[in-house]
Image (tube, rainbow, N blue to C red):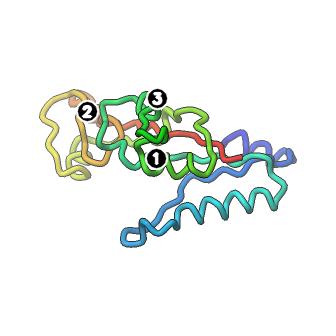
């Protein structure tokens, strides 16, 4: 993203549309809206003469497997050969391919009190903890009064 901004400021012509989030609000899922949004973004890129569309994807079911590395999780498939994860499957059905895991897609740090407030959990000792909704583990360091969560997502290419 930094290179994209630097390139833009330096007059380099864009070749790629990238989007970081596509979300459908609760109660509106299972209606094909996400696919329509993804198609509209891809069409917009083509209309603008861009040659690539890339997306950062946070797999829907990954929080159920926080001990599994993203590189392994992305290889899990059902009998149809598509991912077990519905959000990954949506991208696959649209012809997108996985480029690579984004190993530091999101980093959240906070004090232990903040983490306890955010998670409604208690962290009595230093270590790595499973936190509901997290794709990976939260590292708690009591000596430094610091908790750190590093989330791994997936880069997909649509064009």
Q: Secondary structure at mark 3?
A: helix
Q: Is residue 93 left or right of residue 13?
A: left
Kindly indicate the quadrant of the structure image that contains residue 49: bottom right
Q: Secondary structure at mark 2?
A: strand
Kindly indicate the quadrant of the structure image that contains residue 37: bottom right
Which residue is at a point 66% across and 50% down the rendered structure image?
18
**First-in-chain label (3 vs 2):** 3
- The one nearer the camera, 38 or 23, is 38
Of circles 1 and 2, the one toward us is 1
Which residue is at a point 67% across and 41% down the rendered structure image?
2
Residue 94: where, in percent of width, then height?
61, 52
How crowded is the residue under tag 1: few (<14 C-alpha within 10 Å), some, or many (20+)?
many
Q: Which residue, given by chain and number where applicable, does mark 3 sit on?
A: 71
Q: Is residue 8 left or right of residue 106?
A: right
Which residue is at a point 72% across and 46% down the rendered structure image?
159
Residue 5: where, in percent of width, then height?
73, 46
Residue 51: where, in percent of width, then height?
80, 47
**First-in-chain label (3 vs 1):** 1
Q: CA distance from mark 3 to mark 2?
A: 24 Å
**First-in-chain label (1 vs 2):** 1
Q: CA distance from mark 1 to mark 2?
A: 23 Å
Total label count? 3
User: Which quadrant of the figure contains the N terminus?
Assistant: top right
Q: Is residue 155 above or below residue 69?
A: below
Tell me the tag on residue 140: 2
Q: Which residue, given by chain and number where applicable, does mark 1 sit on?
A: 58
- The one nearer the camera, 36 or 132, is 36
Which residue is at a point 37% across and 68% down the rendered structure image?
26
Residue 47: where, in percent of width, then height?
81, 61
């Amino acid at each position: 993203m930094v290179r994209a901004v630097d390139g833009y400021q330096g007059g380099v012509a864009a070749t790629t549309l990238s989007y970081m989030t596509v979300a459908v609000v609760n109660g509106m899922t299972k209606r094909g809206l996400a696919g329509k949004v993804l198609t509209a973004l891809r069409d917009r890129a083509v209309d603008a003469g861009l040659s690539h569309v890339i997306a950062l994807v946070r797999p829907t079911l990954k929080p159920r497997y926080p001990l599994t590395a993203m590189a392994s999780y992305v290889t899990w498939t059902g009998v149809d050969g598509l991912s077990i994860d519905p959000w990954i499957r949506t991208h696959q059905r649209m012809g997108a391919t996985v480029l690579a895991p984004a190993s530091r897609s999101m980093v959240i740090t906070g004090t232990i009190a903040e983490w306890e407030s955010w998670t409604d959990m208690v962290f009595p000792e230093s270590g790595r903890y499973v936190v509901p909704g997290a794709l990976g583990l939260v590292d708690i360091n009591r000596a430094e009064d610091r908790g750190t969560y590093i989330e791994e997502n997936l880069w997909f290419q649509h064009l």
